[in-house]
Image (cartoon, rainbow, N blue to C red):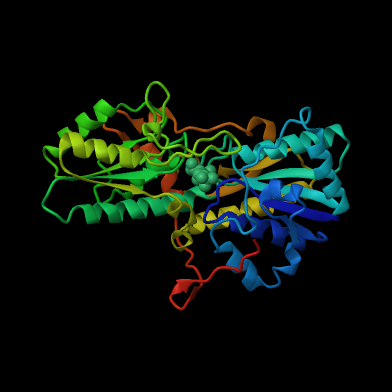
Amino acid sequence: MTGNVLVGQSGGPTAVINSSLAGVFKTAKDLGAGKVYGMLYGIQGLLDEKYIDLGEKLHSELEIELLKRTPSSYLGSCRYKLPDYDSQPEIYETLFNTFNKLNIQYFFYIGGNDSMDTIKKLSDYGTAHQSEIRFIGVPKTIDNDLEITDHTPGYGSAAKFIGATTKEIIRDSLVYDQKNVTIIEIMGRNVGWLTGAAALSEGVDCGGPDLIYLPETDFSMEDFLERTARLQAHKKSLVIAISEGIHLKDGRYVCELTEDRKYVDGFGHTMLNGAANILAQRAAREIGCKTRAIELNTLQRCASHMASLVDIKEAFLAGAAGVRAADEGKSGEMIILKRTSGDSKACKSIYECSTDTFDIHKIANMEKKVPLEWIDLTNNKVTKDFVDYARPLIGDELSPIMVEGLPRHIEYVI
Ligand code: F6P
């Protein structure tokens, strides 16, 4: 590898996104790259010339190990939509001037479907202007909604946290001999991969959630109240998992059924929180029992103490594979994860995963939903196929490095 590397993190963070950063940094250095620069606050920060030389921060194997086990985006992040070239060519000129000034030959962006739009636009611009810089996307998102890849780094750890936390909430909910309903609100925007992971809690020691509502289908308030009341006739304590993105037939998100103003980000995404509270209030009013709303919120994406070892390893692998792909001359592609141990129903004991690359144009801006055949609409649950798909991804643990009883993280750069 000759020349310098530029890497950034974008979109919502995860518990293992820094493991991908470590994979990019270490592999680039091992392959002989010059400097490895990290953009601060993604492409938006780079437009303001915010970047660091990662080589000045990561000196030892221990620091790389700490980085891998530190949640959230070490370099900071953004939700910035790169404008089309035709509307603002000066943005591209500014960015490419910075690339040239820093002698960048390789550009890596660790992110989800919106962030892959940035890779697509930059690589298209680069191709049209005979630039030799190689642009590679490294997948990341707890939502697990990137097309083509079997799953995304970040999902496994969030799913593990959700499965474990749901188990604990169910235990807690059983203590009183009194009717109660607990609603757990789970992230994932318009896809239900994370909410379905609540079903991982089911086993010999736990019955799992009583109802699971994914955003792949329309939500009916009447049906929800009727089912909840019916279930409660023979089970006092109910735990219900809902996606933050559940919506009515007319398209309105349940979380929008309130007077509160909702924040909208740079990609036009409404901040989706509050649905559990709305449902808990309706259930309390109409069923007349104690209710509780639990928003897992950012806890589910920053719980590095509950990270999946499979996920940490794959996140590192994805970063490393990105660097190798760029070194081999690829550009305008994203790293994908492939289950090599049979189809997606493969059981944990034979789960294996490898990497490949795929054309970014067929991935950027798209949303992969949970297949309808993996949703049990009759009982409001997910099917065994869903659980078989998700279970291997939460496998094994890598404890944080503990100091004075708490996880030790790498020092801030932002
Ligand atoms: O992109 C992943 C995600 O965690 C979604 O599940 C969630 O809706 C969103 O990010 C929240 O983003 P932010 O932290 O920018 O509000």
When the figure is inspected, residue 375 is found, relative to residue 348, above or below; the finding is: above
**For this rendering, which residue is in front, 396 or 92?**
92
Total residue callouts: 0
- Residue sitting farthest toward the top: 250
| Residue 207 pos. (x, y %) | 24, 47
Q: Nearer the viewer, residue 163 or 232?
A: 232
Please state, as top left, top right, bottom left or bottom right, where the C terminus lies in the image. bottom right
Q: Nearer the viewer, residue 25 or 346?
A: 25
Percent position of residue 150, x then y: 54, 40
Residue positioned 75% across, 47% down in the render? 47
* Residue 133 shows in the view: no
Furthest residue in direction bottom, as rendered? 404
Q: Is residue 27 above or below residue 126?
A: below
Q: Which image quadrant for residue 53?
A: bottom right
- x 57%, y 53%: residue: 314
Q: Where is residue 270 in the image (x, y as percent from the top left)?
A: 50, 35
Q: Tell me what residue is drawn at x 23 percent, y 55 percent.
A: 171
Residue 374, visible in the rendered structure:
yes
